[in-house]
Amino acid sequence: KAGVTQTPRYLIKTRGQQVTLSCSPISGHRSVSWYQQTPGQGLQFLFEYFSETQRNKGNFPGRFSGRQFSNSRSEMNVSTLELGDSALYLCASSKALDYTESEQFFGPGTRLTVL
Amino acid sequence: QKEVEQNSGPLSVPEGAIASLNCTYSDRGSQSFFWYRQYSGKSPELIMSIYSNGDKEDGRFTAQLNKASQYVSLLIRDSQPSDSATYLCAVRGAYGGSQGNLIFGKGTKLSVKP
């Protein structure tokens, strides 16, 4: 079974630009969560999508947004990039409808560098 | 603010020894707990999940959960140099704004010396 895939793997952008990252979950998984990982803050939750609806949202500014398509693929967008947005962006998928015993599996991540 | 605390390490153990990694969490209502392993430059890999008090064993790994003490640990028996990585503890939030989120500790860096 193929794992979670993310594209692109690496991105270099300049301040003020916007970026779109893509995630394809494991086949059969309907939940996709996005995380930002930085050396200082660790792994922080951005948002979760389930059946094309945002089910949960972390404490990030509105410049960070996402969506999910009917095939469960998800995209996240960051507008007006800031230097502090440089990070590893991770997508994780899970299959359970509820949270109780829902394991999340991570993709390889997208390394974003903002200059 | 729901928190997950881990000793950042580095934790250094000799090859063949038992490595013990610890994690405490603040959300008393949490029911789901996970350990991930992350090699340098790679993404986190799920190695254990635990939902009930007590021990859960999978090969050389044992997860231990004590909800009353809000404490979860991971034991790695017969540690190998290939176990050298950062181990992330994750707790699923139970209430309020954290409900459903995975809240991660900052990780413990483990180094297994040959």
Image (tube, coloured by chain):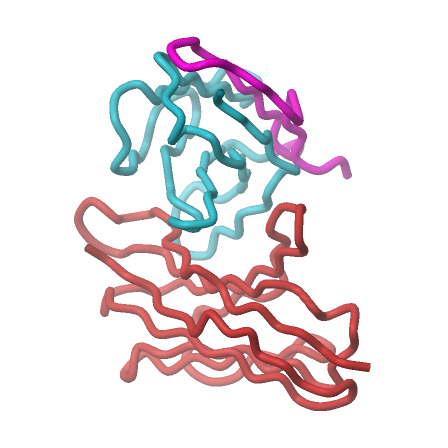
Chain colours: A cyan, B red
B35 or A111: nearer the eye? Answer: A111
Residues B19 and A85: in front is A85
- Indicate left or right for A112 with B113 as reference: left
x, y percentage for residue A42? 43, 50
Q: Which of the 4 image quadrants contains residue A22?
A: top right
**Farthest residue, direction top:** A17
On-image quarter of the N terminus of chain B:
bottom left
Residue interval drawn in magenta: A1-28
Instruction: Answer with left or right where residue B60 lies relative to residue B72.
Output: right
Residue, x 58% and y 25% (percent of image)?
Answer: A23
Residue at the (53%, 52%) spot, across then down: A103
Quadrant occupied by the C terminus of chain B: bottom right
Q: Please tell me how many numbered marks the rendered image carries.
A: 0
Quarter of the image for residue A25 reads top right
Left or right: residue B10 versus residue A86 is: right
From the top left corner, tell me how far across and down residue B74 is, in percent. Answer: 55, 77
Q: Is residue B55 above or below residue B10?
A: below
**Towards the viewer: B4 or A74:** B4
Residue at the outermost right position: B114
Residue B29 position, x and y percent, is: 24, 65
The residue drawn where x is 17% and y is 48% is: B96
Q: Is residue B43 magenta?
A: no
Q: Is residue A18 above or below residue A115?
A: above
Reply above or below: A76 against A40.
Answer: above
* Residue B33: x %, y % from top left: 44, 65
